[in-house]
Image (spheres, helix red, strand yellow):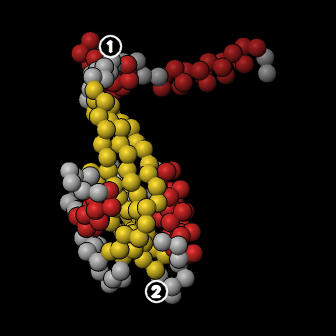
Amino acid sequence: MNQRVASAHLQEEAEPRTARLKVPEALPTEDEVKESPFKKLTSAVFRKKVPIQEIVREPTSGGIVFRMTSDEKDIEVLLIQDSKGRWTIPKGHIEPGETAKMTARREIEEETGLKNVNVLSWLGKIHFKYRRADKLVLMTTQIYLVQAMDVKERPMGEKWMKGIQWFPFAEALNLIEYEDIEKLMLIAKKRVRAGDF
């Protein structure tokens, strides 16, 4: 193939590629650029946070609720799914005049509908911190080992929950998104197996 034929081939291949390129008819307006998803993302990432004005301590309490499987060889754990879709245990704020143990029982009944439960023993406490507007909230949650005494009693979640369900222990352990609760679940299972309440 001579050079003239080769250059004709190159032009034939180049033309269709050039023809496929689309040139915008007009550049975006300033308002369109301001409203672009990238602009919104960068403004959200780089916006200044309101300085923390106050530190708030919130004592809470809850429980790892379990029941024995029908063959008595393993345990099931009751988990609730919060409004953000995360699986966790029932817990809530300690009211004035309540002990942490009383709160655990009350919160379990309110959040799960289970009335026939036995608060067996204290497992430990976990700490969370998060920001609420200009406040830094330091939350300490006392966690108890709680046995559901009536295996036929059906849990009923509150309206804000996305779900409530009994899970085999291993599955519950995988679903929990909080490492501290995960550790206490392992302690709970060890105590149940040993009968050490």
Q: Which mark is residue 93?
A: none
Residue in the image at 33% along x and 61% along y:
101
The residue tagged 2 is 70
Q: Position of residue 196 (x, y in %)?
A: 53, 73
Amino acid type of the residue tagged 2 in the rendering: Ser
Amino acid type of the residue tagged 1 in the rendering: Leu
**Count of number-bearing discs:** 2
Circles 2 and 1: CB atoms closer than 8 Å: no
Residue in the image at 25% along x and 67% along y:
109
The residue tagged 1 is 27
Residue in the image at 46% along x and 60% along y:
123
| Residue 187 as seen in the image, left or right of residue 105 | right
Residue in the image at 55% along x and 21% along y:
15
Extreme residue toward the right, this view? 1
Task: Pick the residue in front: 39 or 76.
Answer: 76
Q: Position of residue 113 (x, y in %)?
A: 24, 70
Task: Pick the residue in front: 52 or 43.
Answer: 52
